Image: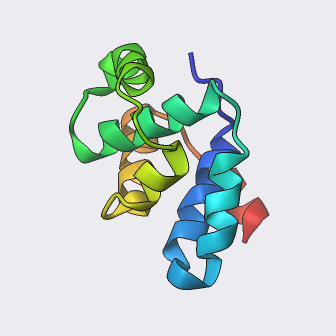
Amino acid sequence: MLEIAPASVVQVILMSREGKVAEAELHEFIAGLNDDEKPQLTAIAWIGRGAFEAEEFDEAVATAIAEATTPTEDYLMGMPHLAENLEAGLEALGIDVTGEEEDLL
């Protein structure tokens, strides 16, 4: 079950698209997520890049928890194409974020 708010994922997508301009804010935003939200955000990104299927969401979350060796914000901000991976992950999970995108823009 998805515990991270889709709006939070959209916020990460939008900030990561801004690049260096929003880097500090993005780092702080991800760092501020709770211990349930961080591995879920990672799992969504992994699903988006094809490392896991949408049906394996719980497994991806468990793997993110088990294999976490660096802070989530550092790991995700080092991931190439973070915004695209998160968008693809949300789409694969069947989560429509159209309303959240409009609210945040």
Identify the residue at horizontal 42%, vertical 50% (top origin): 75
Q: Is residue 76 left or right of residue 34?
A: left
Whether residue 98 appears in this view of the structure is: no
Residue 73 in the image: state x and y as whole percent: 54, 51
Identify the residue at horizontal 40%, vertical 59% (top origin): 82
Identify the residue at horizontal 54%, vertical 60% (top origin): 13
Residue 60 in the image: state x and y as whole percent: 35, 23
Q: Nearer the viewer, residue 87 or 102?
A: 87
Residue 105 in the image: state x and y as whole percent: 72, 72
Q: Is residue 25 left or right of residue 60?
A: right
Q: Tell me which colouring the rendered structure shows.
A: rainbow
Whether residue 104 appears in this view of the structure is: yes
Is 22 drawn above or below residue 32 in the view shown? below
Identify the residue at horizontal 59%, vertical 57% (top origin): 12
**Quadrant assignment, res 89:** top left
Residue sitting farthest toward the bottom = 21
Q: Is residue 91 left or right of residue 52?
A: right
Q: Nearer the viewer, residue 51 or 78?
A: 78
Is 77 drawn above or below residue 24 in the view shown? above
